[in-house]
Amino acid sequence: MSTPASAFDRQWRNTTLGLVIVMSLIAFEAMAVATALPTTVAELDGLAYYGWPFTAFLIANILGMVTAGALGDRLGPRLPLLGGIAIFTAGLVLAGLATSMVVFVLGRSVQGLGSGFVIVAVYVVLGVVYPDRARPRVFAALSAAWVVPALLGPPVAGAITEHLTWRLVFLGLPPFIAVGLLLLRPALAALPAAAPETTLSQSAAARTFAALGAGSGIALLLYAGQRYAGQGTDLLGGAALLAGAVLLAVSVRRLLPPGTVAVRRGLPAVIAFRGMLAGAFFAVDALLPLTLTAVHGYSPTAAGIPLMAGAVGWSTGSWLQGRSPDVPRYLLLRAGFALVALSCTAMVLIVLPVGMGWTAYPIWFVAGLGMGLAMPSVGVLLLELSPPEQRGANSAAMQISDVIAAALCIGFGGVLVAASENGLLPLPIAVGTVDLAMALIAFAGVLLAYRVRTEVGAQQVPA
């Protein structure tokens, strides 16, 4: 039996390092922004728009992922990767130099577009550059590129924000991106510049337009919510609400398998559960630093530590599920949903001034533990229920479900924060409402987990 090649063998070392650096910086930004955001919105007088930096990123990310997949098939991976890195870097600079909330949100949307391009292109590059025997090691290296920023990103971003400036969370990254590009240059030069196909297929074009429609629909829904939170019912808000709902409904039908929204038994339920998990967890996660800073007076560093606790819990849950091959996957999924639901409910303990802010640390560890049990189980179930020739398309649908649900749920939280900023309700009540709403979504997952029960034996997934 041949020994698997190392991702850091001499012929691939620079390429692997370059990919890891670029992916680590994208991951750092994704994990760090929630910690820096309370200080950012305070300086830019933008608390009423708290949800937009998250949602704008996710909306653009959907479009970036779908477009990059289509362009990668047509032009090869070089242009999408280089273009994505350039777009992401431009977004960092735009956000870091922002003097208004509008410019900051625009910067975040540019980051999301570039991030979507890069994430898809990196996996195409991986398939072109590395032989089969080296790919498992490269996947492991790229996994570490997400784990380390998840653990260190929130406290590092908090310390930078607290002792220097939040702007460095964005402006400090481009020099490191340049290092990653220099390391990637030889591999990029050797990549094919174009594929034989020169036009987008009809299905690829349709998915790109559907992604644009979904993003526009989410943006219109969030805009309508912001208007209602600030001005009450009006004609423009109603029109935006109706148009957003129609656009999103039509687009989702093209992007997700039939029955996903209804959580139909089998594969549609699996894809729906991915969205439910992401929406419930990340909506509460996004508001956690704001709650600790605004309600309890925590420093940015201290407010970011619960996010690190969640990452530790996630890694622990992933490790545990990977060593439970005899436990049916739907039971691990149900257990994960239950832990997320209980954690979201328990977060109500910290939203009131008389609450105990420190309890956020263990509570969010438990929420992360639930995600670590559930998310890999969703991936295993998707493979079990997908014919081999449909696994790629279904995996893409699962990612899109994740992003759409997270954007909607975080946007919902942003609307309630806007309502509190406009005096319609206190901030603790707004955040507590989000916590309980997300708990209900997770409890629904507990009740519906039986819909993905399969006759296939449970499979083990490495942590």
Image: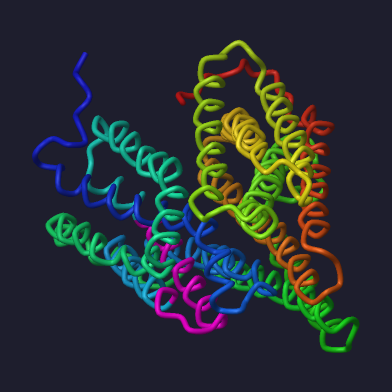
Residue 427, image x and y in percent? 77, 62
For the stretch drawn in magenta, the main secondary structure is helix
Q: Residue furthest left?
A: 10
Is the residue 86 above or below the residue 281 in the image? below
Q: In the image shown, does 73 or 463 lie closer to the viewer?
A: 463
Can residue 191 be seen from the camera position used here? yes
Image quarter of residue 254: bottom right
Residue 45, image x and y in percent? 61, 79
Which segment is the magenta one?
95-121
Is the residue 440 above or below the residue 54 in the image? above
Residue 111 colored in magenta in the image: yes
Left or right of residue 420: residue 120: left
Q: In the image shown, does 125 or 16 lie closer to the viewer?
A: 16
Can residue 385 be seen from the camera position used here? no
Image quarter of residue 76: bottom left
Is the residue 272 above or below the residue 36 in the image? above
Left or right of residue 405: residue 263: right
Residue 247 colored in magenta in the image: no
